[in-house]
Amino acid sequence: MHLLTTLEQGLKDIDARGLRRRRRIADTPCAAHMTVDGREIVGFASNDYLGLAAHPQLVAALAEGAQRYGAGSGGSHLLGGHSRAHAQLEDDLAAFAGGFVDAPRALYFSTGYMANLATLTALAGRGTTLFSDALNHASLIDGARLSRAEVQIYPHADTDTLSALLDASTAETKLIVTDSVFSMDGDVAPLARLLELAERHGAWLVVDDAHGFGVLGPQGRGAIAQAALRSPHLISIGTLGKAAGVSGAFVTAHATVVEWLVQRARPYIFTTASTPAVAHAMSASVRIIAGAEGDARRAHLQQLIERTRAMLKTTPWLPVDSHTAVQPLIIGSNEAALAAADALDHAGLWVPAIRPPTVPVGTSRLRISLSAAHSNEDLDRLDAALTRLGTTMVAEAA
Ligand SMILES: *Cc1c(COP(=O)(O)O)cnc(C)c1O
């Protein structure tokens, strides 16, 4: 009885602070126009930046993969579950995204969360200091904790402070860890400067390219390719459930690093390999991303991004200076952000309110997530709804 009461009180507290999260149920595939909780809406909530999640070629590849390889992998990668589809995907990803290192190799994971835990725990341990951007994704924070390394958090994108911390460090092994595109702000990390610091201090640079892979750089090769960086000390983690439209993640690095992960990374070793059909579909996704269709989708997305930037500047709230598909609008309090999201919901637009602990207290925001699947008419609707909302909320506040 007492055990449940404690949790019930905790949940009441979550309600009182405007922090209760609710899952919505989608009845149709992830797309610009969806049926969610039985209503038709325009979705600005997904990370499906290229609009590939329901692409007919990927759906067909998934079915083909299931025909060829069955429904389940049957085991972990080291004990029987590693299929031809996984191996082929790793080769495809290494060739596509590994241009920043000689002898690149890629390692495929079921999720980005696990790839981050795996990479940090395998490379860092006691005697390591991990230098982590203050706005890094939760999975990097958890990986850092699980590694038992000392963690030094530097203020967001502040390479001067990071440089001073590195100067003062006597750690045997050093890792600099950063998101490429910050997931709740949409800004891009100063990767060139971070690599310079890493090289000067003999540190690894681990880049979580969850929101860059498929979208940034030539052919969508990612944030490191966009910055034209090369180094054997770079490690890139791309996720495959966002722009790539399927699921999973991959680490790309020098072959020696990847072999180390295969031998040592517990989140890689002690889990069942994902369904081979998913890997088979992902190889099809890489072909789309790298080809002319990928270019066309990125160009359309870029035009939507520029339009959205201009549109957000005319609202009474604070847009974040983002040139990526993540376009946040900072509202402030949890209650105000929720009210704004509710008002947009009534207008048939799904724009999630992001609250602490995902973002710092007092910076609750609408996270507008753009996709190549959106049309200019979809943006017109968002523009009109935000204009109406701005007028009413400012009138109410006066
Ligand atoms: C989504 C995300 C992850 C986790 O990837 P999943 O494949 O969803 O587990 C890791 N890092 C960042 C920055 C992300 O946005």
Image (cartoon, grey):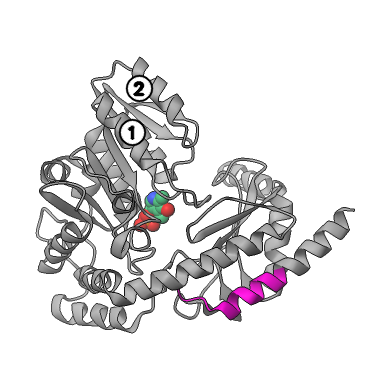
Label drawn at residue 176: 1
> Mark 1: few, some, or many residues within 10 Å (few <14, many ≥20)?
many
Could you tell me which quadrant the N terminus lies in? Answer: top right
Question: In this rendering, is residue 145 above or below 229?
Answer: above
Q: Which residues are magenta?
A: 372-385
- Looking at the image, which residue is at 23% across and 53% down? 271
Q: SS for tag 1?
A: strand
Q: Which residue is mark 2?
A: 166
Main secondary structure found in the magenta portion:
helix
- Say whether residue 12 is left or right of residue 73: right
Q: Is residue 33 above or below residue 221?
A: below
- Amino acid found under the numbered disc labelled 2: Leu
Percent x, y of residue 40? 60, 82
Of residue 170 and residue 81, the one placed in the foreground of this image is: 170
Is residue 389 found left or right of 118 in the rendered image?
A: right
Question: x, y percentage for residue 380?
Answer: 64, 76
Q: CA distance from mark 2 to mark 1?
A: 9 Å
